[in-house]
Amino acid sequence: MESARVRHQQYVRGQFRLTDVVETYLARIETQKYLNAFIQVYADEARERARELDERRAKGESLGALAGLVIAVKDNIVIKDHLTTCASHILDHFVAPYHATVVEKILQADGVIIGKTNLDEFAMGSSTENSYFGAVRNPVDPERVPGGSSGGSAVAVAAGMADLALGSDTGGSIRQPAAFCGVVGLKPTYGRVSRYGLVAYASSLDQIGPFGHTVEDVALLTRVIAGPDPRDSTTVPVEVPDYLKALNQSPLDLTIGIPREYYQEGLDPNIREAIQSVVDRLRKAGFTIRELHLPLTDYAIAAYYIVATAEASSNLARYDGVRYGYRAPQAEDLQEMYFRTRSEGFGTEVKRRIMLGTYVLSAGYYEAYYKKAQQVRRMIKDEFDAAFREVDVLITPTTPTPAFRLGEKLDDPLQMYLSDIYTVTVNLAGICALNLPIGETPEGLPIGMQLMGGMFRESDLFRLGHFIEKQLVGPVH
Amino acid sequence: MAITIEQVEHIARLAKLEFTEEEKQRISRELSRILEYVEKLNELDTSRVEPLSHTTEMTNVMRPDTVTGSLPLAAVLNNAPSRQGNFFKVPKVVK
């Protein structure tokens, strides 16, 4: 696969017509329907926009940073006058009355949006099996999950149905599917990218981020979507660096940390060896590498599932059948309408999380669970802050195992939650992290390595990731 | 921490959800197991730690108090499952 950045440059130079590319991608979407990556495909609109861009290019007009590129968007991000489903029955027929900020920015940069991708309902899951529209399959091995919750977006890029894609990451929902499908994915720093128009799951953890084939691609799309937004007061007013320029800078000044707690029991030996091999080569290349400890890692899943479900139970209270989406028919009175709409509209995992979140916030349990989890969250953040005073980038596995089989963890919620063990810490601390494909298991399943950086230090991740990709690993595809 | 069927029913009422008897059994089992796992947080002494609710910890984000456009009424009401004129229509509130 060619990188999006290269394709953009080729397009601007007139080396291909976008109308042809859109047809190629639409054909691939059609022949790979069994992967179930898309909920909606905007074939006519994509063709129309491609034609307009080809005409503008022919007239010699200036073109945006994403001209020539085809982009898929996770279906929990709104596009004006289009359905947004969140892969839930409860949002039946909901047509968004406005654009998400990230969508506006992509359109302004001349990107072509080809469709909306499948996800775990309301982004709750780690396998993209919890979708009202059915499970998504991994293109590397269709009997395995693509990871989740942004499984459709990871698959769209991995299987050549889009150059780039947007996902959202609350506890690993971009990085884990990127690792399972062998693509690059970034969870930006909390506050880096506007959440306006992202349907909320856990507001203090959610962040929109990009998928691509290479680090350059992800840097390109991050540059387009990042920045403060008056419509999201949690975006932070800091400057967005020119990430593509940063890639030309040697990363040798960066000190690398290896947190021992991420390499203990439960880590697949193939993943351990692949990472060890990259770290050895980094050392040979002259990098300073330090081992360090993050002893609170073991408490992250517990803190995460309390904070995330508490926020979810509050955010999902808005789905009541009154203003939009599904309404249970023939209810006798308002109360019955609420109960039946929500019980019929939400899927099993969403109800499980609403129940857990409601419990930890309920009278008598708030202090013991919710407040305790928030205190542990601060301790975890302090631990990361201390680590980033010693080193610039942490290297860890993205996942404890490669992609698991469809259905394997569906009946055991706790096992499913534990598959996020290396990713949730990043959301609790608010820092940024990148998944980088670094190889495959003997069975041919992708292996992902995670690079974590301090607040607003995406440039460090891109510089080091680009170096590893170009100098040490080579193209994985 | 075992969650009883009565507790499941109480939480369900708060969350405006209803479940079959079989589902209640399953939820009671699953929640008990998850809560047993999160008990491990009690191994940590947090008595001197301030809770953290937002990682950027910004407060009072201000913007100029200027009037900007809002969504047209039709765009909003178009999504209503039931409406009457410019109102959302719901089943009767009082039995």
Image: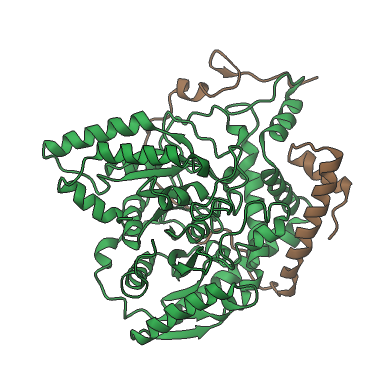
Chain colours: A green, B brown
Picture layout, residue B90 above or below residue A174: above
Picture layout, residue A421 above or below residue A134: below
The reply, left or right, for residue A161 in relation to residue A345 is left
Residue at x-position 88% and y-position 51%: B4
Residue at x-position 54% and y-position 48%: A137
The reply, left or right, for residue A242 in relation to residue A432 is left
Residue A363 visible in the snapshot: yes
Residue A399 quadrant: bottom right
- Location of residue B61 in the rendering, given as x and y in whole percent from the top left corner: 44, 51
Residue A192 quadrant: bottom left
Image quadrant holding the N terminus of chain A, namely: bottom left
Image quadrant holding the C terminus of chain A, namely: bottom left
Residue at x-position 30% and y-position 53%: A4
- Location of residue A123 in the rendering, given as x and y in whole percent from the top left corner: 57, 47
Picture layout, residue B39 above or below residue A27: below
Residue B65 visible in the snapshot: no
Residue A266 quadrant: bottom right
Please tell me which residue lies in front, A137 or A319.
A137
Please tell me which residue lies in front, A399 or A82.
A399
- Location of residue A232 in the rendering, given as x and y in whole percent from the top left corner: 44, 47
The reply, left or right, for residue A248 in relation to residue A411 is left
Picture layout, residue A342 above or below residue A211: above
- Location of residue B23 in the rendering, given as x and y in whole percent from the top left corner: 81, 42
